[in-house]
Image (cartoon, rainbow, N blue to C red):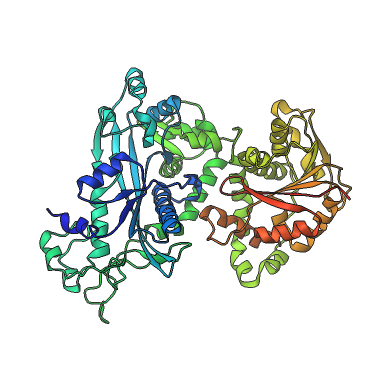
Amino acid sequence: MVLSPVIGKLLHKRVVLASASPRRREILSHAGLRFEVVPSRFKEKLDKASFPTPYAYAIETAKQKALEVARRMHQKDLRAPDVVIGADTIVTIGGLILEKPVDKQDAYRMLSRLNGKEHSVFTGVAIVHCCTTDAQLDLEVSEFHEETTVKFSELSEELLWEYIDSGEPMDKAGGYGIQALGGMLVEHVRGDFLNVVGFPLNHFCKKLVELYYPPRREDLQRVKHDSIPAVDTFENLSDVEGSGSDPAQGDDGGGHGRAEAGGDKRQGPAGMQGTDSTGTGESPPPFPAGLLELIDGFKASKALFVACKLNVFDVLKDGAPLKAMDIAGKIDASVCGTERLLDVCVALGLLEKTDRGYRNTELADVHLASDGEYSLHGLAMRSNDHFWNLFTDLELAVREGASAAFGRKAEEPVQSKHKKLQFMRAMHGLAMLTAHQVATAFDLSRFTSACDLGGCTGALARALTQEYPRLKVTVFDLPEVIEHVTCFQPEGRRPDWMSFTPGDFFKDDLPEADLYILSRILHEWPDDKVCELLSRVSSRCGGILVAEKVLEDKPAARGSLPSSLNLLVRTQGRERSLPEYRGLLERHGFRDVRLAHAGDRLDVMLGTRASPP
């Protein structure tokens, strides 16, 4: 058969599928592939918001699954398999990623969102080639994704619940299985059907062709890149099997990179090497879609900021869909400009567009409407009105250093009530996202009093008192901040179990407390100011809780990079590694400094003193 030469390249290798999915097992088995199944233990908790596209999230998850299995098998046997295959399938609609439902109600929410609409199914696939030399694991990673569009029919509530009660949705991305009962929900499919089932076999075989059959120069004009070569192409290509895991026998083409045991790196695509000096027969490079998205990224951010500033998401919150003309009237803008802005928001996954008009996605209702409990509207406005201008000085800061840039253009002090509240809304939105994780990162039940330095609106203090009812928390912040905190309290009043004290933590007396909390404070300051603050704090407490993003040796996640640039253009502070934070805390008497993660963008450290001096 046509695919036999492709799959045949793996017959003499030890192949492992890093997935427990019976659907993926069945697809690959029917294709004639022989493999073992070793389910990955990778915890799928990547921050979806840090990825530019849904498929980038799926690819990274698939890669981490495969790498975890490869490294675990190498540690266990001191020899990894030759090839590990990882895959992750997600369903997306309106920019929202739908994975496996946690219960029947969650399945109903997912299926209701898909009902009568088109959605995309993405599968990310990673092919990891392993080689062990002198007990050292060498990894080569190749990755790709496939997209299939699926349209659901208009389905009745009765039919949806009948399907949910069958139990089928519970272990499937998006809450349905197209290969079984879920097929009755689907009106049409555009693309690879097997991709929706769980594994894009056709694209997988194309990738094997790239890896194991790099085209000859004379074939480049004859072979169509978007299809699997015919049988005679395989039979005419010379290929000698080796004993190791090098798929190209010294020809390092095929779109996969080499990685030492700790990571991966990508190389050029197959067919790019070996071209003559005149460029005759050279294949074009892959289309740089990701790079173009980065170049245009500032436009997407500005569109989001403008939509927030015009209160588009407030107008559409919890209401029926509205036409562009109606929205334009409510936000006092032109119909033409409004429609273009709304269409961009649809493309960004912030709005949905139907025949009836535009409406918020769930993401926009929760995070972009200004009055939501977890609203980031204030952060968007702060980014638009404040950080956007600061980042015009990024080149200066890079050329001359943070100190020079900071000296030339110090931040203007917050003066107007509008600016004060905008700053507080931004900080409040960030704090609300992580307050519970910070409050529960460690067992703090031994402490009876705490002081949250720079605690702003008290979002973290509230979470602490809810988790520890006996804990009395004082929020210590600047007077111009404290005077507006009632705007952020439920029903506009300050709770009895939480107090607010105005002051400057570098100048004024600090309250006595068992535990001092510094959340997102220390990175704003250079080491000498951090030492000054810790010296003041250490004489007042028996423990310290620090919440910051801790630098790691591995490359930073994309979502954490902007904060590093923020520090470059606006303060003389910096982010620090765990040894650096531990050294600073131990220098001021805090011992047994422990680290816990509070999501992908924040870490929490707890240090204690034997007794207050």
Is residue 229 placed above or below 51 in the rendered structure? below
Q: Quadrant of residue 107?
A: top left
Residue farthest along the bottom direction in this orientation = 277
Q: Which residue does the image show at 77% across and 28% down from the upper left?
A: 495
| Location of residue 437 in the rendering, given as x and y in whole percent from the top left corner | 63, 40
Q: Is residue 389 visible in the rendered structure shown here?
A: yes
Q: Which residue does the image show at 65% across and 50% down from the upper left?
A: 595
| Location of residue 447 in the rendering, given as x and y in whole percent from the top left corner | 78, 38
| Location of residue 416 in the rendering, given as x and y in whole percent from the top left corner | 74, 45
Q: In the picture provided, is 311 more to the left or to the right than 610?
A: left
Residue farthest along the front direction in this orientation = 77
Residue farthest along the left direction in this orientation = 232
Q: In the picture provided, is 302 more to the left or to the right than 156?
A: right
Q: Is residue 191 visible in the rendered structure shown here?
A: no
| Frontmost residue, 610 versus 43 | 610
Q: Which residue does the image show at 63% across and 55% down from the upper left?
A: 550
| Frontmost residue, 26 versus 163 | 26
Is residue 595 placed above or below 270 in the rendered structure? above
Q: In the picture provided, is 240 more to the left or to the right than 416?
A: left
Is residue 43 placed above or below 270 in the rendered structure? above
Q: Please count the marks in the image.
A: 0
| Location of residue 539 in the rendering, given as x and y in whole percent from the top left corner | 87, 51
Is residue 153 placed above or below 129 in the rendered structure? above
